[in-house]
Amino acid sequence: MNIRKTLSALAVSALMGLSATQAIAADSIKIGSFLAVTGPASFLGDPELKTLQMYIEKINAKGGVNGKQLELVHYDTSGKAKEAVGFAKRLIKKDRVDLIVGGSTSGSTLAVIPLVEKDRIPFISLAGSVKIIDPVKKWVFKVPHTDRMAAAKIFEDMKKRGIKRIALISGSGGFGKSGRAQVLALAPKQGIEVVADESYGAKDTDMTAQLTKIRNTDAQAILCFGFGTGPAIVTKNVRQLGIKLPLYQSHGVASKKFIELAGESAEGVRLPASALLVADKLPASDPQKPLLMAYKDRFETKYGPVSTFGGHAYDGLMIAVQAIERAGSTDKAKVRDQIEQTKGFIGTGGIFNMSPKDHLGLDLSAFKMLEIKNGDWTIVK
Amino acid sequence: MKRLRGLFLLALLVVVLPILFPDNYYVTVVAVSAALHAILAVGLNLLMGYAGLISLGHAAFFGVGAYTSAIITTRFDLNPWLAMAAGILLTGCIAFIMARPILRLKGHYLAMATLGLGMIVQIVLVQAEGLTGGPDGLGGIPPLSLFGWEVDSDLRWYMVMSTVMLLVVWLALNLIDSRSGRALRALHGSEVAAEMMGIDTTATKTGVFVIAAISASLAGSLFAHQQAFISPDSFSFFFSIELVTMVVLGGMASTFGAVFGAFVLTFLPELLVVFEDYEVMIFGAILMLMMIFLPQGLFVGLQGLLRRLLQQRAPARLPAPAEEDKHGAA
């Protein structure tokens, strides 16, 4: 009897599954998404999903796009590239979405690229790695700044301060590794010498050993590339060891969480980040300011402190929506062409100007150099 | 032929499904992953179910196969089939070398050792950035092609994957019914007794370990070409556990049980995905219920149940043939 019950429960759940997926609105524009809403990268996926839901609701309330309602089909990858591939397949082949905005981490984005290229579906990624758009792939776009741009922005600031020799410390995760490669590749071209190249593991709780080594070099500044708790520990350890060198962090720590974790040690740390973090400190003449304030207000009244990651989701969604409007249909090839022709779009990450050779469309001006003062972000002039 | 009845049934199903549902997501996409998992589970079942040797590092061999194929085809531009063979050779060698020290261990210690093996391979895949691409993975893996027949669509992958699965199932069935298969089962019962009967237990264990590893490597190569992109993520400890679950869920020491377990564990999450946040919870609950009510495994348990139901009905009809028999004898 028990067995029969188990089986009938199984059958019922299977049937429910089938009928639920078949009950899809006939005439809507389907936007597919796979994000790391849970798991170690949830700080990316969570604000991204909230932003997508919030703005799709808003657009639908205003009558949708081309007279059609938007429909979000979302799956949680919990940050796993393998899951991302499965869900991307499902989005394309089962849900038959019109385009995909998603992929919180570089790993999950890179994993689905072969798939979207083969099945010819426009894909706007929300992940950082430069490998996503370099070399250019026909159907793949991205909106966040690349790690290469972050490195370039940091070097620009270093040169202004006359820094020529730096010590690098990077996380061993995907973000840190990719950032490290960009720093090492770009440094010689900028006339900067990397005199120390240290790394730390994802679960390390103390980096004094690496930093002691760095202290014994003739570096003029320390650059830390990573995200999560690692950079905060590095920041604390640097101060504990009494190292007086300027400390640079990457855009991977561009959230209030970092200041909370590093506490007073964070004073004086510089990092490149998008203008969203300092929206209220921008001059009134800044073209991005009205949008940034609007997004910030909207997000913060509903969910709490804004992060740049949710902003990426806004940029991706809006670029997609505008492309569909201009294309006048959801024809995949037309939408793709229109995304590629995005010009002068003001997003949270900067002003986007895409082209067949540039599927990101941001330049270094999109990054602001920030310094942490009195526990808050300030813009370095 | 009676021995292979199950195989023919499975083959029939494999052929009929795409004819009935040529453009169904569950057939052309999910069933392909299910077939891949089945290849892995059948191999692992030889080790776990028949020989009684637990392995928590099976994903490692899967990963070595996948990465060998990926690296050889992308960095050295060699033929995918050659790469596949190289993967099998490499995995076979690793398994052969590892087998002696590892298989001396028993029970929990063996589980620990295989777990360690899985971890080591995972770390190498992440750290050997120059070769494996590190945590970002390795892309641009070319598709397989067979005399100009390029395996580039879902349906074609379905054909390739299910053919290989049928082949592996057939080999496993034959192996189990061979002399070495009987040796394996004897080993499971009692190692000492097996030795007393003149079975070279070390050689038998090493052999089955290598066979399981080779089948995983084969699956890995297919996986790499199918996905065109691989990252260390796919070969983690969790995948090893998933494979063990497939074998246990389907029913240990049953090749079709392993296939069944692989299919259930692949399809279930796909069907449950509509429950969104509760998906994992429901999934866990279903697994728990299955293990409580069918502890010997889904396939084996259901088989037993069916047999019992038939027997319950049988007594009513039994006397008649018995009488006929008497007449016949007389």
Image: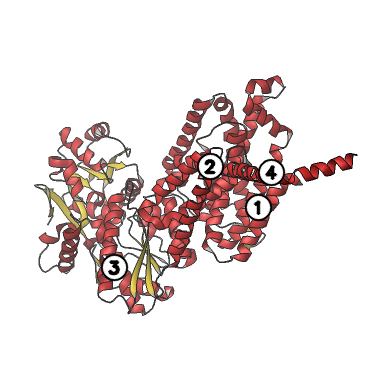
Output the chain of dot 4. B
Q: Of marks 1 and 2, which one's residue comes earlier in the chain?
A: 1
Question: Does A311 sit above or below residue B283?
Answer: below
Q: Which mark is residue B249?
A: 2
Q: CA distance from mark 1 to mark 4?
A: 14 Å
Output the chain of dot 2. B
Q: CA distance from mark 3 to mark 2?
A: 42 Å
Mark 1, other Cα within 10 Å: few <14 / some 14–19 / many ≥20: some
Q: CA distance from mark 3 to mark 1?
A: 46 Å
For residue B179, side relative to residue A85 (left or right): right
Question: Does A342 sit above or below residue A204?
Answer: below
Q: Which mark is residue B171?
A: 4
Amino acid at the residue labelled 3: Ile
SS at badge 3: helix
Q: Which picture quadrant has residue A206?
A: top left
Output the chain of dot 3. A
Q: CA distance from mark 1 to mark 2?
A: 19 Å
